[in-house]
Amino acid sequence: MSTIQNKKVVQLNYTLTDDQGEFLDQSEPGAPLVYLHGVGELVDGLEKELTGCSVGDKLNVTVDPVSGYGEIDEALTLTFERDKLPEGPELEVGMQIATDFGDGSYQMFWVQEITETQIMVDGNHPLAGRTLTFDVEVMGIRDATEEEIAHGHVHGEGGHHH
C-alpha cells in the first residue's frame, strides 16, 4: 500500500476553518486538491502530518501560525501616496497586486484601504497570524512523473498545465 512521501502526487478532500470555527475554504465536491508532496505546496504543519498517511485516512490537523502562513509582519503593511503609483488598472479594496523590486524579485500585496490621497496595502498572507484547522481525507496517492518532479508541481491530465 502506498503512503504519502516526498515526490508523491496526493489527492485530498479538505475543509479549512480557523480557531474560532469560522469556515474559510474547502475542496470542491468531486474535485479534490491535487499536489506534489514535499515541494512546499502546502503549509508545513499540514504537510508534515500527512507524511505516512494512506488512501482513506482522515485527519483533523491544527496548524499554528508559524507552521501555517506565518506570523503577521507589520513591516509588510505599507502606505503609498496615490500620485506616486505607476499608471495601471483602477485599484479596489481586496485586489491583489504585485510589487516588482527591480532585481527580479516581487512581493504580493492585498489592497486594504483606499483614500483620496493614499493606498494602504498588506503583504502578509490573508491567513497569516491565524491558527488553522484542516479536516482532510486522503483520496489518492501516486508516484509523480519525472516531468512533474523536474517542474516541482503536478501536471493535469494530458500533460503540462500551469
Image (cartoon, rainbow, N blue to C red):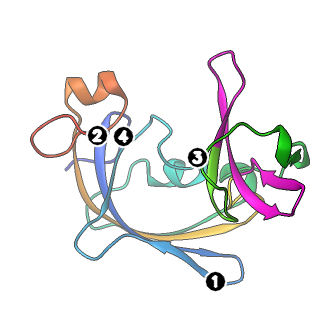
Q: Element under label 1?
A: loop
According to the picture, the residue beneath numbered tag 2 turns out to be: 154
Write down the quadrant of residue 18 in the picture: bottom right
Q: Residue at x 19, y 45 (%)?
A: 156
The structure residue drawn at horizontal position 9% and vertical position 41%, both measured from the top left corner, is 158
Q: Earlier in the sequence, mark 3 or mark 4?
A: 4
Q: Earlier in the sequence, mark 1 or mark 2?
A: 1
Q: Residue furthest bottom?
A: 21
Residue farthest left in this picture: 158
- The kind of secondary structure the magenta stretch mainly shows is strand
Q: Is residue 55 shown left or right of residue 91?
A: left
Q: CA distance from mark 1 to mark 3?
A: 21 Å
Helix, strand, or loop for circle 2?
loop
Q: Provide the residue designation for mark 3.
A: 44
Front residue of 122/82: it is: 82
Residue 105 is inside the magenta segment: yes
- Tell me which residue sits at (29%, 64%) in the image: 32
